[in-house]
Image: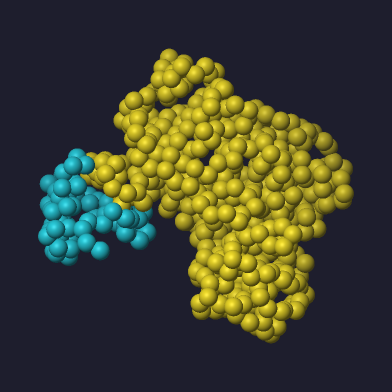
Chain colours: A yellow, B cyan
Amino acid sequence: MVDVRYQTEFTLYPYQKVTEQDAPAPVRHPVAIIGGGPVGMGMALDLGLKNIPCVVLDDHDGVGTGSRAICFAKRTLEICDRLGACDPMVDKGVIWSVGKVFRENRQIYEFNLLPEDGHKHPAFINLQQPYFEKYLVERIHEVQARGTPIEIRGRNRVQALEIRDDHAALAIDTPDGPYEMEADWLIACDGARSAIRGLMGLSFEGRVFEDNFLICDVRMKADFPTERRFWFNPPFNPGQSVLLHKQPDDIWRIDFQLGRDIDRQAVVRPGFYEPRVNAMLEGVKWTPEWVSVYTFQCASMEKYRHGRVFFAGDSAHQVSPFGARGCNGGMQDVDNLAWKLALVIEGKAGDALLDSYHTERKHGAEENIMNSSRTTDFMTPRTGIAKLFRESVLDLVEHTPAMRPLVNSGRLSVPCTYDGSPLNGPDAPGLPRRTRPGSTLADAPVEGGWLIDRTGGTFRLLAIGCAAETVEANGITARVLDVAATDVIRSRYLGRARQAIYLIRPDQIIAARWTGFDADAVASAIKHATAG
Amino acid sequence: MTGLSDTPNIADADGFYQELLSAHENLSEAESHALNARLVLVLCNHVGDRKVIREALELAKRAG
């Protein structure tokens, strides 16, 4: 039996029996991905598009119902764009970049997450997670039709797992009974309560926050501007905070902070939330779409790679929701792992490259956990003195802009820079800090489109204001993209230099840079970036 | 520049804030008061300029 753990919003991959289930011996697959959430589906798409056959095993047959992630960051959109799934997301999503912070009824602070021009994608879109997943799966169906080797198996639940020398052996349950499967590589994308992590007996340690939050997704027609609004101590939720976000389909997310000791049954009743929502919306007509209480924790596995098994997304690391660093962080795991695993499977890189997945993404997860924990500590001061400092910051910020950086209502997801990564190659003095090795490519308009569209998927060489030639090393090719030194390119890539060469990884991370072209230096940087 | 600065001036503001709160970790209320008082005195000495200190005092009083 495969139990149904939750309701699905969209049925996308109904269970179908495959011949493999009756095979006399287990069939071996190059890659098995466990979990069909955004990270699992993104991983399948990224690997499949690199022509690496993979099979996704999900114990449901579609996308779960209810409110989960809603804020998708620019970097996630860039990754999805590379995978060909971005357009419907941006079409459906609500684009925003401005956040406003209020204390009681007074606006004390406003910020813009994308204060500069010259980027293809917006700072953020808000989109209900079920749509995000649906568009990824629809993209998978589209590429499957032209032969991309991705298979999705709905209502296939992993019951047991054995790690052997050169593969993982899986026992799987289905509505037609159990079967066995083998996989050279296993990627666990099965969420914060990862069954794979449990089957392997691995720990997931961190910090539980003792606060409760009430999500009210409400449907209403309102002409509030499209911006993130955050209140400290508003009259409609005294002593606590409130967050408001617009979503597609006239749905608005309201997040009420509740405090520590609450009656979880009472707060989801209309008698509790209706007066609060009414007071907040001041006469606007609304209907409830989804109401639930949540608490959260920050936690991380010690290692994200265990031999032939990788953990990605919430199975590896979990953050508090403030800052939208959960799903966005998970998509960066996809971005980081897929090209490395593909190169190893193709025999173009050694096994050690895969260790850098752990090194780099643990660095990213720690930054995400640090940021979301600091936000939580500001919103929910743990001690009297912490509360005193928080209130003092808010008192002062109404009188001086000097205190603005200390107001923390969420530090919204931006990709980390892999400073100190073993894959980073040479840097050249004098070039801008924001594009140093380990940084994510900074988008910019280039002739005929966007830099972000002209890179990714393979190694590329940006030749800015000088000539370069295609470089090959270990069977890996970096073709040249000639980039004119416009003002935007100058400020993001040249600084005071007249010319520069940038080596860009398949995940659009800057691997190395120079102020002149030297084929041998580039070849050695490619080897370094794929050696681990 | 003269007078009290009105512009953000602390590098890695979130890191600073965490460090400040960490210094108070496990202190009693009286100990926290005393720590804050010592900190004010040390920082005022660092600033030195009486005009700036007076403006800071006025701002802190006004904002309360």
Q: Is residue A306 left or right of residue B32?
A: right
Location of residue A173 (image quadrant): top right
Location of residue A127 (image quadrant): top right
Q: Quadrant of the N terminus of chain A?
A: top right
Residue visible at 77% across and 59% down?
A50
Q: Nearer the viewer, residue A508 or B48?
A: B48
Q: Is residue A225 left or right of residue A477?
A: left
Residue visible at 46% across and 41% down?
A99
Q: Nearer the viewer, residue A192 or A291?
A: A291
Compared with residue A50, is residue A473 higher up or lower down, i.e. above or below? below
For the image, the number of numbered tags is 0
Q: Is residue A182 visible?
A: no
Pick out the residue farthest to the top.
A271
Residue B44 picture location, percent across and down: 15, 60
Residue visible at 17% across and 65% down?
B46
Residue visible at 77% across and 67% down?
A346
Location of residue A392 (image quadrant): top left
Q: Quadrant of the C terminus of chain A?
A: bottom right
Q: Nearer the viewer, residue A308 or A132?
A: A132
Q: Is residue A270 left or right of residue A67?
A: left
Compared with residue A304, is residue A157 higher up or lower down, i.e. above or below? above
Residue A201 picture location, percent across and down: 55, 50
Compared with residue A230, is residue B19 higher up or lower down, i.e. above or below? below
Residue A383 picture location, percent across and down: 26, 42
Q: Is residue A345 visible?
A: yes
Q: Is residue A374 left or right of residue A172?
A: left
Residue A68 picture location, percent across and down: 56, 35
